Image (cartoon, rainbow, N blue to C red):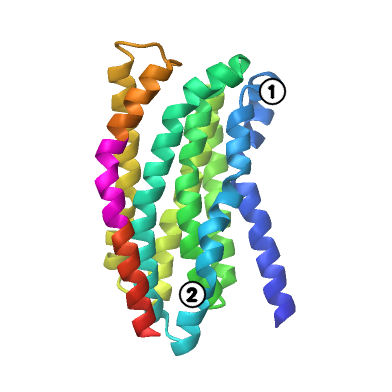
Amino acid sequence: SLLSVGVLALATNLLSIFSTSVDRTVMLSRLGTGPTGYYYLGANIVALLPVVAGLPTNVLTPRFFEVYGATSRGDSLVVLVDRTVRAGSVVLAAVLGVGVLMIAPAVALLWPGLTEGVEAARIAALGTFPVVLFGLVSKVFYAMNRLVVCLVLLGLGAGAGLLCAHLAVTASPTIAAAAAGSVVGLFTTYVLGLLVAYQAMAQRWKLGFALLVESLAPAVIAVALVLLCDRVGGRFWPAASLVRASFAELVFCACFGPWVLRAMRRLQIGRASCRERV
């Protein structure tokens, strides 16, 4: 009934909010208000995660319902999920990489008292990646009226994030450790969500695993590029230097630019394929 769907949707949204607040929950309970105060920027980034995730998913939600409603077959959603996740992962990794490289100079310029929270803020920004991608994948469960599955996945991810954040803080009592632990939970939700979605669409798990690996590759490469730029730039300029950030941005964009253009073309082809199927 509509009432049960509404209740499940509300529970899903509440659990999604909790999963993105695990870092602050652990910081306050284990580290206190003092260190947590340096997480001001990271907390704002995390607070925007549901909003950011809603932008692409809200646009694509009608397409998921349209494609599935035309056939009532789960496999009709495969092309939409595949093309969107592949292209979205590349574009999102590029945007996050550019943003992360600017955090240090921006904080030094605008909030010089919060420089101790820069590392944690950069880690928190990484959490946007799995949140947005899971937001895309979760529309499979919405279209097929399987919100219970989505609720379970969010619960597992939130539990994993809570556990990993506590373990990380135990090993290293810092806000960066808590942020890293919570990000593990967010990635757990996406990994499980994509694999389960492929099962729901009556596809072999190997296909879901192949898409998972390809979608995570841009994030891994983006992180590697950011670390490389930090290492090289650190030999010549201080961490908060705008010159260093500009150098890093040029290197990063030169590496990711062609990949992003190919991803956008792939997304356009994916939309055309979905229209033909409908």
> Counting other residues with Cα less than 10 Å from the Cα at mark 1, is it few (<14), some (14-19), or many (20 or more)?
few
**Residue 118 shown left or right of residue 13 in the figure:** left
Q: Which element type, helix, strand or loop, lies under badge 1?
A: loop
Q: Amino acid at mark 2?
A: Arg
| Residue at position x 33%, y 26% in the image | 248
> Could you say where residue 218 lies in the image, as x and y percent from the top left?
31, 46
Magenta region includes residue 259: yes
Residue 152 visible in the current orientation: yes
Residue drawn at the location 64% of the way across and 55% of the way down: 15
**Viewer-proximal residue, 103 or 40?**
103
Task: Report the residue marked by disc 1.
Answer: 32
Closer to us: 207 or 222: 222
**Which quadrant is home to the N terminus?**
bottom right
Asked where in the image residue 116 lies, by quadrant, the reply is top right
Q: Residue at x 37, y 24 (%)?
A: 246
Q: Which residues are magenta?
A: 253-263
In this view of the protein, which residue sits in the foreground, 83 or 190? 83
* Residue holding disc 2: 63
Q: Residue furthest bottom?
A: 71
